[in-house]
Image (cartoon, rainbow, N blue to C red):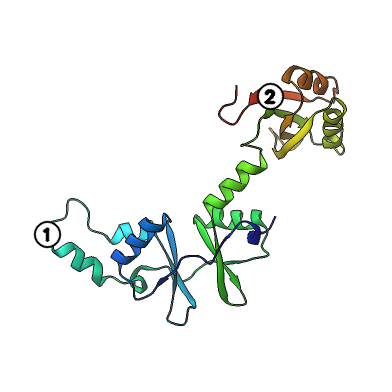
Amino acid sequence: MLVKERMTRRPITIGEDASVNEALELMHRERIRRLPVVDKQGRLVGIVSELDLLKVSPSPATSLSIYEIPYLLARIKMRDIMTREVITVTEDTPLEEAARIMADNKIGGLPVMREGKLVGIITETDIFKTFLEMLGGRETGVRLTLMVPEKKGMLAKITGKIAEIGGNILALGTLMGEDPSTREVTIRVADVNKEDLTTALQALGEDIRIVDARLCTLTECA
């Protein structure tokens, strides 16, 4: 999966001459938390987050009058507070690479560029929604978490057994296990009940351990 499949196209931007007030109003109206900043030619020159704006806004304990605050915020422009060294990605960046860049740099969004032009933005919310979809979070089925040996062919054996008993795999994800010799596998399966599924997988042997098993609907997992 690539960034272009999950990014927001034609992102909302703000000019470098815009004030803090204008930026806060725009974020509130559009329900967003970051704005790419562009110059008069539409070129990306920075990015500003809601936190950046709040940092320069007077606190409730300020001694400024209610008349002074709007005047102060109107004087502070995006060019004064924006991050100028913007980390960006391209449309063809793998989604997991974009997530790694965000995590490593502790940022919540990345402008997406094509030949020097801003064409989108990918955010932590987009990544979270993708994670939810990949694990079948909005589908009804039996959710199993397995601890399996790190051996070739293990996933083939597990998925083959599920198909054999008539199960339909809705989602499957793997993580590092308890140590380098194991993997944690999470599967969501439809068209089979929990008891039959766990019995069939335990019968495989292969040191497969069922860590968790529950029926998940659109509203709960139990």
Residue at position x 58%, y 50% from top?
Answer: 127
Above or below — where is 150 with respect to 28? Answer: above
**Viewport quadrant of the N terminus:** bottom right
Q: Is residue 182 visible?
A: no
Label 1 neighbourhood size at 10 Å, few (<14), some (14-19), many (20+)?
few
Q: Which mark is residue 2?
A: none
Callout 1–callout 2 Cβ contact below 8 Å: no
Q: Tell me where residue 181 sits by quadrant.
A: top right
Residue at position x 28%, y 64% from top?
Answer: 21
Above or below — where is 196 with respect to 26? Answer: above
Instruction: Using the numbered discs, state the Cα–Cα distance from disc 1 to disc 2 in whole angstroms.
Output: 59 Å
Image coordinates of residue 54 in percent, x first then y, are 31, 57
Residue at position x 48%, y 78% from top?
Answer: 42
211 or 118: nearer the viewer? 118
Above or below — where is 177 with respect to 129? Answer: above
Label 2 neighbourhood size at 10 Å, few (<14), some (14-19), many (20+)?
few
Q: Which mark is residue 65?
A: 1
Nearer the observer: mark 1 or 2; the answer is 1
The amino acid pointed to by label 2 is Val
195 or 206: nearer the viewer? 195
Relative placement, left or right, of 17 versus 67 is right
Secondary structure under tag 1 reads loop
Q: Earlier in the sequence, mark 1 or mark 2?
A: 1
63 or 70: nearer the viewer? 70
151 or 42: nearer the viewer? 42
Relative placement, left or right, of 110 versus 55 is right
Residue at position x 64%, y 65% from top?
Answer: 91
Image coordinates of residue 61 in percent, x first then y, are 17, 51
Mark 2 sits on what residue? 211
Image coordinates of residue 171 in percent, x first then y, are 71, 38
Secondary structure under tag 2 reads strand
